[in-house]
Amino acid sequence: MSNFTLSDLLRLSKLSQIKLSEKELDKFSTQISEILNFISQLSNINTQEVSPQTHSTGRKNVFREDEVKPSLTQEEALKNAPATYKGFFKVRAIFTEETQK
Amino acid sequence: MINPNQLTLVELQQKIKSKEISPHELIQKTQDQIAKVDTEIFAYVSINERAKDQLTSLVSKGNDLPLLGIPMAVKDVLSTKGLKTTASSKILENYIPPYDATVVKKLKDAGAIVIGKTNCDSFAFGASTENSGFGITKNPWDQSRVAGGSSGGSAAAVAADECTFALGTDTGGSIRQPSSFCGVTGLKPTYGACSRFGLLAMASSFDCPGPIAKTVEDCRVIFNLMKGRDNQDATSYYKDYGAERKKEKIKIGLAKEFFSEGINEEVKKTVKKAASLLEENGFLIEEISLPHTQYAIATYYILVPSEISSNMARYDGIRFGKSREVLEDEVKRRIVLGTYSLSAGYYDEYYDKAARVRSLITKDYLEAFSKVDVILGPVSPTTAFKIGEKTKNPLEMYLADVLTSSANLAGIPGLALPCGFDEKGLPVGMQILGPHFSEDLLFFIGETYQNLTDWHKKKPNLGGKNGN
């Protein structure tokens, strides 16, 4: 199996939106290498004839009626929000106008 | 005078009904016990200040509820309406859910009182409660040791008589292993038997909420109130299995892989002794094999982090909660690991491969259950380990789940119960694993064993000197 490098970790940190400090990068790259090394034992097993299993009790296509029922009030739903505006979540802007260039 | 904190749920039900004990007195005594011992144990991350008021309003309705006034502790990954639920992580430090998890609601509706929220590894990622963002739960039998995890606070609270029973969750052993370390009884139900609605998700195809209690009988009563289909969780499902299974001789399999080299000798000896006792009392014992057991941890640590990386994406700090930087180390580690095994170029090598091995592990169990009715083995390769012993090396911590995680891969139920002590005076636990939805059978065997033994009645020596 593949060698896990610091650049892999940097890419994953970006993909998963987790900023890692220098210390964390150092620690995690060693630890994750070790874990992947341990995991590589799975390559010893022949799985060509086996299909992947993603759940365990074999339930499929579970449907229910779409019923209108009481739900959380707007007030309850917003209770944990640090900032609200007229009954909405107030969040930081995601898109900004391009000012640099 | 009897100490109500030490009584089992079934004993309390009788004494409350006969008015020998008042529910208010019981709640007060439980709170007194928490005040007395929890500074040492740290089983609770928050206490329900309104417990007595909630009881008063329940009692005033004059309901004849099965769990009226029974103090219940709830693992901090299960949502409790109006009561802080942090998953023992800094990212949700101030989060107060506006609704109850289905399993919590069902037990509250049955009259149970949430006494407090118990500590766990943050988001239930761990096997020792040392990954909690708020502190380490100590083992009531020896406070230099871990209570196990991730439901360490729940198991310790039951062992230290800080509640009558507790709710935990088991994704890779997180109910069974702490129950074993703390000398109490815990059930990991069949996947789907208890709703996951309101459970802060770890790995959605693995997570199972379940009870931790003082006896198998108590676990049975609680499980029967928790289980069942819930429209809020499409994977929830329960079918009655017990009746078709009534037979004269129950065959118990001892999987040779569960008694292999890496397992502590005293643990093996103690569990084998329990098997002999069951054999003397009419059960048949047969050696079997689960050949892919050695691959369970590797499989688990691909599939579970993959599901974690997806589930944890919701904690973006945008609408509420703190930003991702405050996540605990193990959470970051698993998100990164899962992102890796799902990412382009690695998916086939990791995720798909592990999902195929998962099939093989499940097949091992199905084949075994065509020969025997249940499988018995140790819960953990060792008794409770020292605080700090495994925190430097995450892989070593992962291996603590070597005997429990395969049941989660297969989705089968497992009952953990105490079966003795090692030379250090630490509890040893065994687990009985059965086919999907065979909880009744597990309870029957477990109750038979607890009628023959009194390991489950032993109490740690608390509120004074350490040890037992």
Image (tube, coloured by chain):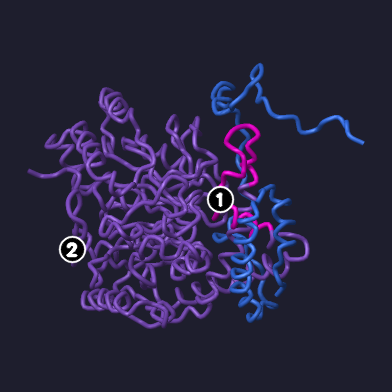
Chain colours: A blue, B purple
Q: Quadrant of residue B116?
A: top left
User: Tag 1's secondary structure?
Assistant: loop
Q: Residues in magenta? A: B313-339
Circle 2 residue: B454
Give yes or no for residue B272 being in the magenta stretch. no
* Image position, residue B255 (x, y; %): 41, 78
Q: Quadrant of residue B106?
A: top left
Can the viewer see residue A70 in this picture? no
Quarter of the figure that contains the C terminus of chain B:
bottom left
Q: Residues within 10 Å of mark 1 (few under 14, many from 20)?
A: many
Q: Residue at x 18, y 63 (%)?
A: B454
A21 vs B242: above or below: above
Inspect the image, locate mark 2, and give the three-letter code of the amino acid beneath it: Asp
Q: Residue at x 30, y 24 (%)?
A: B57
Give yes or no for residue B325 being in the magenta stretch. yes
Callouts 1 and 2 in the same chain: yes
Circle 1 residue: B235
The chain carrying label 1 is B
* Image position, residue B264 (x, y; %): 35, 77
The chain carrying label 2 is B
* Image position, residue B8 (x, y; %): 22, 49
Distance between mark 1 and mark 2 Cα atoms: 37 Å
Residue positioned most to the right: A101
Given residues A67 and B197, the one toward you in this image is B197
* Image position, residue B355 (x, y; %): 63, 67
Q: Is residue B199 left or right of residue B372?
A: right
B134 vs B48: above or below: below
Q: Is residue B96 left or right of residue B284?
A: right
Q: Nearer the viewer, mark 1 or mark 2?
A: 2
Q: Residue at x 25, y 37 (%)?
A: B31
